[in-house]
Image (cartoon, rainbow, N blue to C red):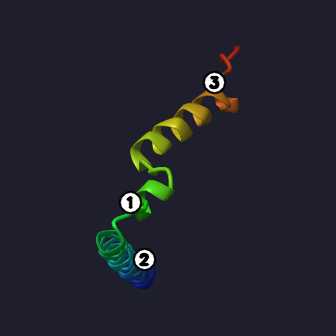
Amino acid sequence: MGKRFISALLSIVITLLKFIVNMLTLGISFLTKKTLPLVDDLFEPSDESTEAIERQKYVVEHSPYDTPIKY
């Protein structure tokens, strides 16, 4: 339970920091009339569902248990 709480808390803190940085970026770009990249534009998006599917495919392809049973 402690790990989940810390993980949730860190997730909220990271989201708030991204929001603050994005708002500061928008404010600065409004004042200077220049377009600055937002936080989400700097990093590639991480889609957990596609990563999980790729991991499952890897496990299935490299499984030692898929050999046929010989009697």
Image quadrant holding the C terminus, namely top right
Tell me where residue 10 appears, x and y as whole percent: 42, 80
Q: Residues within 10 Å of mark 3 (few under 14, many from 20)?
A: few
Residue occupying the point 70% across, 31% down: 64
Q: CA distance from mark 2 to mark 3?
A: 36 Å
Tell me the SS state at disc 1.
loop
Tell me where residue 15 appears, x and y as whole percent: 35, 73
Q: Which residue is mark 3?
A: 66
Q: Which residue is mark 2?
A: 7
27 with respect to 49 (left or right) = left
Q: Nearer the viewer, mark 2 or mark 3?
A: 2
Residue occupying the point 60% across, 36% down: 59
Tell me where residue 68 appears, x and y as whole percent: 66, 16
* Mark 2 or 1, nearer chain start: 2
Front position in the image: 9 or 34: 34
Q: CA distance from mark 2 to mark 1?
A: 33 Å
Tell me the SS state at disc 3.
helix
38 lies above or below 17? above
Front position in the image: 60 or 71: 60
The three-letter code of the residue at mark 1 reads Thr
The three-letter code of the residue at mark 2 reads Ser
Residue occupying the point 33% across, 66% down: 33
The three-letter code of the residue at mark 3 reads Asp
Give the image quarter of residue 25.
Answer: bottom left
Q: Nearer the viewer, mark 1 or mark 3?
A: 1
Tell me where residue 23 appears, x and y as whole percent: 30, 75
* Mark 1 or 3, nearer chain start: 1
* Mark 2 or 3, nearer chain start: 2
Identify the mark at residue 35; answer none if there is no mark. Answer: 1
